[in-house]
Each structure stands twice: as structure tokens, then as C-alpha cells.
């Protein structure tokens, strides 16, 4: 038995119902070999990967209809990777990534639980270059700008892994760091448009979920 408790939740993403194994609550913690600690994941942060977050649902629903034709896609900070599961069902060329030690086994389990091929996964620390990962047409993430330094870290990651002509779609619940991220990406040639979505059933009026869609067109002679 693992040193943590889980539950199965049923959730509607796009036009399909998914069964997701998640941690039973935010008080879970199990790091017997110290892997999470070595990665800088504290006991208070440990359970965050294993929760279904409203921003993750909003991003996953956006991926149910987003144009994916011919695009290589990377989800960063995937956690339970709801968006990647939706994309896998659509036959997308998608890789999910995270640094939490349990993100990969939870993703494999949830892929099988929903009768999907296992979503390709790479361990990715935002501040550590991973040249073998390559470059992507589309990078996506949900609630990844939750601390001030993350705007700079993820902007640098985008610089390493976005193709010259690329798109990004990030769902932000309004933690106050998206402005710095937008400015950093503008220096890389990205323009942004914003749309809004409800984060939960109590949020139809304020629409606190912000979907930030960044686009960059390739310059002449750049491939």
C-alpha cells in the first residue's frame, strides 16, 4: 500500500466523462526516499499535483476544441494532466511534463482508467534545461504562475522549447503574476489575447478564469 490515500472522481471534460484517480485531500504526504525533498517540493506542496484544480478543468475543456492539427504540444506543470488526457483522446501529438515524483505513475494510471494509450511523459524542472525535449508548436499550462519567480522561469522555458512560430495557452486564476509573464513573452515576439471562463459553478458572473493565448509568427528566414 502507498503511504497516501486516493479517490476516484468523475469529471466532464469537453464532450466526454473521465474517471480520475486523485489524492483524497490536500493533507496527503509521502516521500519515503526523499525524492520530493531533493527537488525542492515541501510537505505542504507535495499534494498539490494530485488535486483536480478549477484552472486545470478550464484548460482541459479548452483543449477539447482547440486547433491541434499538425501541432507538437507540451503541457508543463501537468499535475494530473487533465488537458493532456483530453488531447490524447483527440489523437494529438502531446507530451505531459512535471517534476513531481508521482505525476508519471498517476498519469499512466488515469490513461488506462479511461481506456486511453499512455500519454508520453517527461520529467521537467522549469529552471533546468532539457535539450532532448526539443521544440513545440503549442505549450500549455494551468495555474503555473502561482509564485512570482515562475513568470521568469517559464518565460525562459518557452524560449528554449517554443518553435519560431508558436502558440501558448495558459489558464490563470488571477494570482497576480501574469503581467510579468506577458511582458517577458512580448520580448520574445509573442502577442497575447485574453478570454474568460468560469472556474466553478459559483463563478458565472465574475469569470475569474483567464485564458491567455499567446501567438508568435516566424520571422523571414527563421525556422
Image (tube, rainbow, N blue to C red):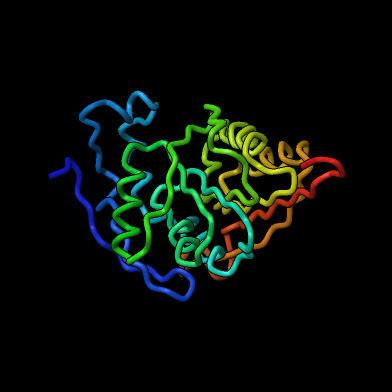
Q: What residue do we see at 30% from left, 28% from top?
A: 35
Note whether 6 is above or below 40 in the view shown.
below
Q: Is residue 31 above or below residue 52?
A: above
**Residue 65 or 120: which is nearer the viewer?**
120
Residue, far top: 38
Residue 62, by quadrant, is bottom right
Instruction: Specify the quadrant of the image occupied by residue 101.
Output: top left
Q: Percent x, y for residue 204?
A: 54, 70
Q: Position of residue 120 (x, y in %)?
A: 43, 49
Q: Please tell me which residue is depicted at 47% across the width and 43% down the height of the picture.
A: 77
At 62% from the left and 46% from the top, the residue drawn is 136
**Is residue 214 visible from the viewing direction of this image?**
yes
Residue 54 visible, this orientation = no
The image position of residue 58, as x and y in percent, is: 52, 62
Instruction: Give the x, y percent position of residue 49.
Output: 37, 45
Q: Nearer the viewer, residue 167 or 40?
A: 167
In the rendered structure, the answer to whether residue 103 lies left or right of residue 72 reads left
Q: Nearer the viewer, residue 65 or 27?
A: 65
Report whether 58 appears left or right of 105: right
Q: Quadrant of the N terminus?
A: top left
Q: Residue furthest left?
A: 1
The residue at the point 76 percent across, 48 percent down is 216
* Figure label count: 0
User: Closer to the camera, 57 or 160?
Assistant: 160
Quadrant location, the C terminus: top right
Q: Residue furthest right?
A: 220
Amino acid at each position: 500500500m502507498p503511504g497516501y490515500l486516493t479517490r476516484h472522481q468523475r469529471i466532464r471534460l469537453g464532450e466526454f466523462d473521465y474517471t480520475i484517480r486523485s489524492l483524497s485531500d490536500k493533507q496527503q504526504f509521502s516521500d519515503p526516499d526523499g525524492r520530493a525533498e531533493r527537488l525542492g517540493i515541501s510537505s505542504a506542496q507535495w499534494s498539490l499535483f494530485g488535486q483536480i484544480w478549477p484552472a486545470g478543468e478550464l484548460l482541459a475543456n479548452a483543449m477539447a476544441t482547440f486547433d491541434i492539427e499538425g501541432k507538437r504540444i507540451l503541457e508543463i506543470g501537468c499535475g494530473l494532466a487533465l488537458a493532456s488526457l483530453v488531447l490524447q483522446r483527440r489523437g494529438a501529438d502531446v507530451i505531459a511534463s512535471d517534476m513531481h515524483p508521482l505525476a508519471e505513475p498517476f498519469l499512466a494510471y488515469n490513461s488506462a482508467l479511461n481506456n486511453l494509450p499512455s500519454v508520453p511523459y517527461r520529467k521537467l524542472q522549469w529552471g533546468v534545461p532539457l535539450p532532448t525535449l526539443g521544440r513545440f508548436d503549442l505549450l500549455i499550462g494551468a495555474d503555473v504562475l502561482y509564485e512570482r519567480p515562475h513568470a521568469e522561469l517559464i518565460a525562459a522555458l518557452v524560449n528554449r522549447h517554443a518553435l519560431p512560430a508558436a502558440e501558448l495557452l495558459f489558464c490563470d486564476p488571477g494570482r497576480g503574476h501574469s503581467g510579468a509573464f506577458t511582458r517577458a513573452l512580448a520580448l520574445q515576439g509573442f502577442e497575447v489575447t485574453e478570454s474568460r471562463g468560469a472556474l466553478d459553478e459559483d463563478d458565472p458572473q465574475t469569470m475569474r478564469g483567464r485564458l491567455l493565448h499567446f501567438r508568435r509568427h516566424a520571422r523571414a528566414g527563421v525556422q
